[in-house]
Amino acid sequence: MSSETIEFFFSFRSPYSYLAAPRAFQLPENYEVDIRFRGVMPMAMRGQSVPSQKRIHTMFDTKREANRLGMPFGPVFDPIGDGAVRCLRVSELAVDQQLEKQFVLAVSRAIWAEGVDVSTDEGLRPICIAAGLDWHACQQAISDPLIEARVPVFRFREQLLWGQDRIEDLERLLDAAGLRR
């Protein structure tokens, strides 16, 4: 049986991406699939506004989901701007070194459960090192050109699935494709 690829589009500013990441990276242990991490620019940095009521709802909803999943949530650091860009650039380096899982899980937990300011070297450096990345290489990656914005989704074959709450739907597709280990 050949392995399939699932593209995992991830925004460092999305608490839903934070909630989805541990389960997304776990999928290859249960299915004949590979996860291809794809970092995306946050919606607000792509010119899309988020009404304040939606932001408030998202925080309450995310806290409720984090509790259900047994994941820590809060204090939070909003990585909008430099924080998100720095994480995106370092995530590309992490992909090149096959350390994307370690980096994404560490940095998203730092943002959404530890309130770490990833827009500073002081905040990002220990996360990079803990994920197995060389800090000098990370600094060089941070200086690279901006990453092209993409839309956050899971893609399996021709199916697009939006958001962390669709992992169960993705698992049904994987089961139907006969990819369960």
Image (cartoon, grey):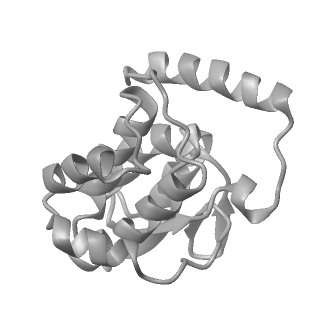
Q: Is residue 96 left or right of residue 70?
A: left
- Residue drawn at 24 percent across, 48 percent down: 127
Residue displayed at 47% across by 41% down: 18
How many numbered markers are drawn?
A: 0
Q: What is the quadrant of residue 48 in the picture?
A: bottom right
Could you tell me which residue is drawn at 40 percent across and 47 percent down? 118
Instruction: Identify which residue, 62 or 34, lies in the foreground.
Output: 62
Residue 145 rendering spot, x and y as whole percentages: 50, 83
Q: Is residue 128 visible?
A: yes
Residue 110 rendering spot, x and y as whole percentages: 35, 37
Q: Is residue 28 left or right of residue 60?
A: left
Q: Is residue 84 above or below residue 21?
A: below
Q: Which quarter shows the C terminus?
A: bottom left
Q: Quadrant of residue 35?
A: bottom left
- Residue 26 seen in the figure: no
Q: Nearer the viewer, residue 54 or 138?
A: 138
Residue at x-position 13% and y-position 59%: 132
The x and y percentages for residue 90 are 35, 67
**What quarter of the picture does the N terminus occupy?**
bottom left
Question: Does 4 sit left or right of 10 as displayed?
Answer: left
Q: Is residue 51 above or below residue 105?
A: above
Q: Quadrant of residue 159?
A: bottom right
Q: Give above or below for 112 relative to 72.
A: below
Q: Return the x and y of residue 74 as percentages of the image width and height.
A: 45, 21
